[in-house]
Amino acid sequence: MAPTRDINVVKLAVEMRAMDSKTVPFLGEFSLQDPLAAFIAGDNGVVDKVVSVGSGRRSRELCVHWKVEHPENFALQYTEPSVYYVTEKNRSKIKDGTVLHLVFSAGKMAEDILLKLRKTPDEKKDALEKLVRLSSDPTFANEFIGKHGMSFLITCLEMAKQDSPMLPLILSSFLELMDHGIMSWDKLEPTFIERVNIQPVAQVAMYINTPTPVDMRTLNSSLTILENIVLNSQRKYTIVEKQVTIPKLLNHISSNKKGEIHQAVLALVNALIQKSEPQKKKWCATLTNRQHRTIIYNNVVLMHNESTSSGSDLAHQLYVLEQLLLNQYEERMNTSMDVNDQDATEKIKELRKIAFESDGEVPSGITPRRPEYKKEYKKLGFKNDINPAQDFKDTPPGMLALDNMIYFARNHTDQYAKLVLENCYRADSHECPFGRASIELTKLLCEILKIGDVPTEQGQSYHPMFFSHDCMFEELFSICIVLLNKTWKEMKATTEDFRELRRALEPDILELIQQHRLRFLVEGTRFKIARGVRAKDKFRYCRLSPNHKFLHYVDGDEKSAPSLDEQFKKISIADIKSVVTGKECPHMKEKAVKKNPVNLAFSVLLDSTETTSVDFVAPDERTYNYWVDGLNALHRQTMPSPQTSADLEILLNMEIKLRLLDAEGVTIPSSPPPIPPPPPNYSFCYQLP
């Protein structure tokens, strides 16, 4: 009988990458219970202790194997999926068949780079290129920052000229090192911020008219650095406010076609708006200015819609900007009518004048009586026809509803007058009251657009029309109120129809959507496991069993669905503890996966000691929405995706129109019509003579 294998011992391969000479790889075993230092160093005094894998002994002497001294200067490094130093904290990733590299330790690499940064330009450039590659590694970052490397890097930045090829390397390294959170952004000196701003970011001050173009990497890194300062520094962001202006930042959008630059500019603009409350209204007013809004619309919105390669980061920044601009309506939405507000009172009077007085003025010599006002206010559809101001007491929508109504009356006068007059000649039960409808419509739009909500980290859905008009929300209201009146008239609706019918139909529609999601899960989906060159062909296929009791998944390299003969792993739906998405997923919490699409990630958390989670990255947003909805539906939870809300709205509207369709005199059969008989032949091809 073969001896039982120790489960704590793994077989692996290690390649020497610290030396330039070609060496024979190490093939051996490693005990997961042994320290890494012992595996690297071994016993330098006994060279002949190295044994092969087949001998049954554990080979632990890497430095002995390659006959190198000073083992404290060496460390192990993963080769995939991310090239990071192996530490005692992340060593659990070592499995059977793992290939590692023996490289110089993080401490030695940090010392060598700092030494070369003080030497010739060629050595300095070589050191910066190495620094860029290593800065994303948290182990190296700790060593480099611990040796006061950041202070020296800032000194290098201050000495670098604008056209220096080292400037992009310095900024990229600085950004990666700061991204670990080891050093606080508050510790940066004001001179550094001014230096970063003036030279590579907006080409302001002495460099604004320079004939030499700024390197794109320099510009991108600088914008991102300033964004981080604004978001993460409690004291330094005011310095950034003084150094940059939104018009100058938008110039980079109009002068560059790179999506990365557009994303970085919008990210900085959004950060400035979110951080500074006193300047928020001023900046939003600047962005909605026609000249600046057109820059964003023509160069970002239209290009993003037309390009299939635009990244999700750009869509997210457009979503955030749209939400911040819409949130400027929050104050009016939550403002109740004040009886002493003379401006609001005049607006209500103006609504009546535009609708019922062709020239907008009362003829001279005539003093209208109060009862006539009451009758006209009633025709306008106010609940309180004696004092219409009372209709705007409730918040939301508060005074925002009145703002929308007066905008529609002033800017779309013909449509406003037509809408009011049409309802004057309808029966009372079938009229669409303009006042009440406008208030409810404004409230509904505020809910749909989530006015007042903080932008989410995963949001990417934005509306191009909001970047194409000066008064975006008011214009949307104007379109919707006309459409509402048209639909109301076509359906011959009454004021009580909609709420009751929607409430009655919604459960059945949600059940229909849920069945669709579960059928999609039963069909199965091929997910990509990870990103990267080495993992580009790794896939995970997963499907729901037809009885909805198990998830079956298998990993492999095939791009098509696996056959039923393959060995699937099985998860009981009863063992699923919860479903998490985005940054809450275990495989999205590590630095190594920062470039993966967080918005498409979801994980199934299990009540199991063997496997705690099964992780997925959906190939597209539609697949992500369907799987997250389906998994939640299996546990009788609310389907959370925006796709569900959109589907519900479409299906409800269709069903309501069918239910309220004028079918008088039309006989609707109780059973489907019979299928016609098949044709005498299937020769449908026609040959020309």
Image (cartoon, rainbow, N blue to C red):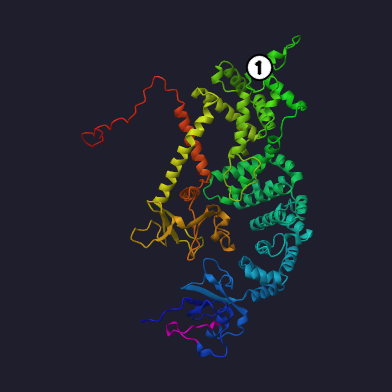
Q: Which residues are magenta?
A: 50-62
Residue 340 percent coordinates (x, y): 78, 27
Q: Amino acid at mark 1?
A: Glu
Secondary structure of the residue carrying numbered label 1: helix
At a point 70% along the width and 71% down the height, the residue shown is 146
Residue 16 percent coordinates (x, y): 54, 78
Residue for badge 1: 376
Please indicate whether residue 55 sits to the left or right of residue 193 in the image: left
At a point 73% along the width and 60% down the height, the residue shown is 185
Front residue of this view, candidates 655 and 106: 655
At a point 63% along the width and 73% down the height, the residue shown is 106
Residue 99 percent coordinates (x, y): 49, 73
Front residue of this view, candidates 149 and 353: 353
Q: Quadrant of the N terminus?
A: bottom left
Q: Is residue 569 above or below residue 63?
A: above
Other residues around mark 1 within 10 Å, as few (<14) / some (14–19) / many (≥20): some
Q: Is residue 367 magenta?
A: no
Q: Is residue 60 magenta?
A: yes
